Amino acid sequence: MGREARSAKLCVGPVLFHWPAEKKLEFYTRLATAPVDVVYLGEVVCSKRIPLFENHHQDIARLLKEAGKKVVFSTLAEVMTQYDRQVVARICAMHDELIEANDAAALYHLSGRPHAIGPFLNVYNEDSLEFLAGKGALHATLPNELPRAAIAMLGRKAQNLGMGLEVQVYGRMPLALSARCYHARAHGRAKDNCRFVCGQDPDGMDLTTMEGVPFLSINGIQTLSHACLNLIREMPALAGMGVTHFRLSPHTGDIVETARLFRAVLDGELATTEATTRLAALAPAPFANGFYHQREGYKWAEAG
Amino acid sequence: MVRPELVCPAGTPAALRAAVDAGADAVYCGFQNATNARNFAGLNFTLREMQEGVTYAHERGARVLLAVNTFPPAGQTPAWKQAIEDGVRLGVDAIIVADIGVARHVACAYPQQRLHLSVQAGASSPEAIRYYCREFGVKRVVLPRILTVPEIKAIHDEIPCEIEAFIFGNIGMMAEGRCSLTNYATGVSTNMDGVCSPAHAVRYEEDTRRNLTARLGVFTIDRFSCGEQAGYPTICKGRYCAAGRKSPYYAFEEPVSLNLSSLLPDLMRAGVSALKIEGRQRSRAYVHAVVSAYRKAVDDCLAGRPPLLPDLLALTEGHRETRGAFGGRRWR
């Protein structure tokens, strides 16, 4: 395994799903012991969930920092209501913290000072990356639908700009956002009286086709892939392209063990085939890596 | 009440002429490649057709808005820059962009060129819109189809640019510019390739009892019993199964079209500067019918008459219509 892979950082993205506060607290307490370098905190999907957990963020941030992790605060991916706007403004006002912008509303507040660009903000090309770097972006996480060739060019650009570049390598892939809550809809409710029915599905609510084929996964206003992204085999190549950070997206499978497998592969201590076999026992669904290989996103290209 | 601009779809030169003849104040169109979000076979303009279209529109007092509103993947930005250079040279009245890099290019290379922010940029808050105005001098924002009329009014009062709002046509359920469902199922990207539910990936299969299955790639999007009207397989309009649902259901939305004719006076009072009709993939006859009806409705509003609600149901998807998010929060 190359030098770039060994020096690459492992990150844990924000919890996308609606977990009870005690489950999230347990998750972050365990995460403090995991071999990860960066942890993203904050609700990015639904602002209605924010009051249920935000008073824990400072304690969790302290715990993680004491364990040697870097903490980044992520903002909402969809900003629409007065409340959404207030939440984004409040997070962006934390001048001592690094903030990850997931929407242009956050960029409005963050431009001109150091910040990070999240995967929900469209950065598809070197011109966008360069412009954002000029406005203070130190780091960017790419949209998961970008193919290898585009990532390679963005990797070179990020190196020239001295930016960190991050790619999601594990977890269900965010595919779409909507104003409508599909969890509430499935239960015959509207978003305003959802009663947090999304909490019933800690890895997302499966949608299958009328022929019973698993297809998508619903998380409130967000639609994710049914398949679980797994780029563990592609990580060394990505590191060689200038990708400096690798993101694991949280699921109910043990995060510490998941992180250990990815770290061991980056450090050249575990073969990717063995790691993938062990990951399959932790993952919420079968694997996919199609986007990277410029195929349908649900496809899984085996080694070879 | 300010006179709003009626902005109409021109997927082809014939549709452009039909829209202008039917009273469009402006038409929007794109070149024949991935630089615009309706990159379908048989649609859009060659350089020469664009030149003729601009002349035809300008001679009749209509404006031409050029959509360069997809997201170029790294390494492919020259095609987008070429589209912009061509548009500027042909004298289009505005360029509609979504990508930050593309917006930056127009603002730097052609500072005099009027810039509109595409719905594909997904700017749904005053802060997001102000960001694009501040950084790139955007003069008009096309609002996502996810806002209520009071929310549009509130945004209007807080931004320094004009608002363009959709009033009729296909209604996508997902936030525009942030949907990779098509790419997940077909390997073709809406954001990068400008295509949603590409025709080459669509299959209809009929069984012995004449039930029709509509697929996108390998995935069944809907099934229609004999006699039921079959729709085009769009992922966000499909029927699926979920635990806790006894039968397949429209998990996102039913196949309906947006029709805001009843809200026209409210939208105009909310400060909307331009009313947009969706449908660059539609025929010349469709464009003529819809633009004529809305021309009359808008003129009625301006004259203080209750707008005659055009009967456009027969033209809508699934022959059913909705006011979508514009009608109120229950929709969410």
Image (tube, coloured by chain):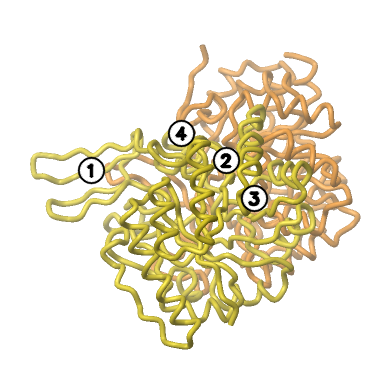
Chain colours: A orange, B yellow
Chain letter of mark 3 equals: A
Chain letter of mark 2 equals: A
Neighbour tally class for label 4: few under 14, some 14-19, many 20 plus, Cα within 10 Å: many
Which residue is pictured at 23% across the width and 48% down the height? B223
Which of discs 4 and 2 lies nearer the camera? The answer is: 4
Quickly name the residue at label 1: B213
Q: Are marks 4 and 2 on the same chain?
A: yes
Chain letter of mark 4 equals: A
Quickly name the residue at label 4: A298
**Do the CB atoms of the residues marked 2 and 1 lie less than 8 Å apart?**
no
**As shown in the figure, which amino acid type bears the numbered disc 1?**
Thr
Chain letter of mark 1 equals: B
The residue most toward the top is: A304
**Do the CB atoms of the residues marked 3 and 1 lie less than 8 Å apart?**
no
Quickly name the residue at label 2: A253
**Do the CB atoms of the residues marked 3 and 4 lie less than 8 Å apart?**
no
Which residue is pictured at 13% across the width and 54% down the height? B227
Q: Which residue is nearer to you in this view: B142 or B197? A: B142
Residue A226 showing in the rendered view: no
Residue B204 showing in the rendered view: yes
Q: Is residue B95 left or right of residue B14?
A: right
Q: Are marks 3 and 1 on the same chain?
A: no
Which residue is pictured at 41% across the width and 70% down the height? B294
**As shown in the figure, which amino acid type bears the numbered disc 2?**
Gly
Neighbour tally class for label 2: few under 14, some 14-19, many 20 plus, Cα within 10 Å: some
Structural distance between the alpha carbons of marks 2 and 1: 36 Å
Q: Position of residue A241 (x, y in %)?
A: 72, 21
**For residue A15, which numbered disc appears in the image?**
3
